[in-house]
Image (tube, rainbow, N blue to C red):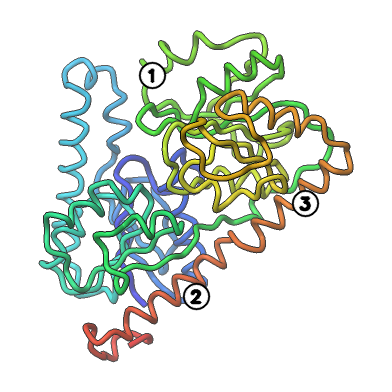
Amino acid sequence: MKFGVIGSVSKPTTYDTAGGVEVWTALFLLESVKRGHTFDLYGLKDSLTIPEKIRLISIAAHGVDAINHTASFQEQHPREYDYSSLLGILFSRINLYLKEHEAQYDMIINSSGSPFFPVNWDLYHPPLVTIGHFNAFEPYVSYFEYFPLPPHIFYVFPTQREYHLAKEIPESQKFYVPHGIDSERIPFERGKRTHLLWFGRLDPKMPKGLPEALTISNTLKIPINIYTYVEDPNYFRTHIKPLFSQYTHFYTNIPRQEYFKNAKVLVIPLGWEEPFGLTFLEAMASGTPVIAFARGSVPEIIQDGETGFIVNWSETDSRGNWITQKTGTAGICEAIERVYALSDADYTAMQWKCRERVENHFTIAKMVDGYETVYQKIFQKELLPASPKSAYR
């Protein structure tokens, strides 16, 4: 099949970038070309390309994040308004290119998270598959409370939670396929591990609990390694840097494979409903257990007591009867102490369960197998008449 893929306009689409959407899209493309498909990727300069398999249609040299982080832009423009305007400009450029070339594609994959394309898809002819990278209450789904839903658009959600929350999308137009990672890129790490670990984008709009993780490290007097990409430098200066202590080890621009070498446990005290979290899978693939609040995707990924521990966010927000009975940061501290109290044999057993959990349920190969099934189901629908153009029709 020939696909058009709408990629990110925030950062280049590569495996080594600092965004989950970009990493997922790169992994999806790399695995999908093994199935004989070809792609046009609509994205930023320096995004992934493979001769005769993945052609990059470069929309701009600089993404929204790079432009927004320049000092001159921050001085001259109100952040929220102009950030949205930049997104609109770049997505409009994709729209022009895509409309011109749509006849070349069997299907379009929308991996951008933008509502721009789904709500306008009645203007296009190929079927559109939108990836559920974000919460189902965000505009790329929720706008269909106000706009008519075209019959030839479909959604794939990586968790059952988001699948069921997307009430605007009928059952016949949505699917559930868990995200996956390339576990072969992440070595299983043995040896003595001592530090806590936190890694991810530092963005106050999608809080992954770095202030809480630093406070917990200081309280328990356990060193913590922080690997991050700072989305908002001002937030970093005012809310993060003051929490640094002798226990804090802060890094940027370090290869992912380095994150786990000294990590006893990944600590993610989520402050929002994480739609999925590739970080959980990457940690578990390395043999690093995960401790996180029971928010968003966490109960569908982590097995409580086996691949880490799940903690209720508060006494009034109970989402399960977990092993750790305390809630909030006190519960995270209790869970950490449980991990550090494990014997070497029990900790090693937990490490292997982490790796097995990923390899049995969350590999990129299993994920793309799921997408192959989705394509078949879409092209079997009566609303997409048979055509010799695609092997699936």
Q: Quadrant of residue 237?
A: top left
Dot 3 or dot 2, earlier in sequence: 2
72 or 349: nearer the viewer:
349
Dot 2: element = helix
Residue at horizontal 10 percent and vertical 67 percent from the top: 123
Crowding at dot 1, Cα within 10 Å, few <14 / some 14-19 / many 20+, comes out as few
Tell me: 340 left or right of 388: right
Tell me: 189 left or right of 51: right
Crowding at dot 2, Cα within 10 Å, few <14 / some 14-19 / many 20+, comes out as few
Residue at horizontal 55 percent and vertical 43 percent from the top: 279
Residue at horizontal 50 percent and vertical 45 percent from the top: 277
Q: Which mark is residue 233?
A: 1
Amino acid, disc 2: Arg
Dot 3 or dot 1, earlier in sequence: 1
Amino acid, disc 3: Trp
* Residue at numbered disc 3: 352
As drawn, 330 above or below 169: above
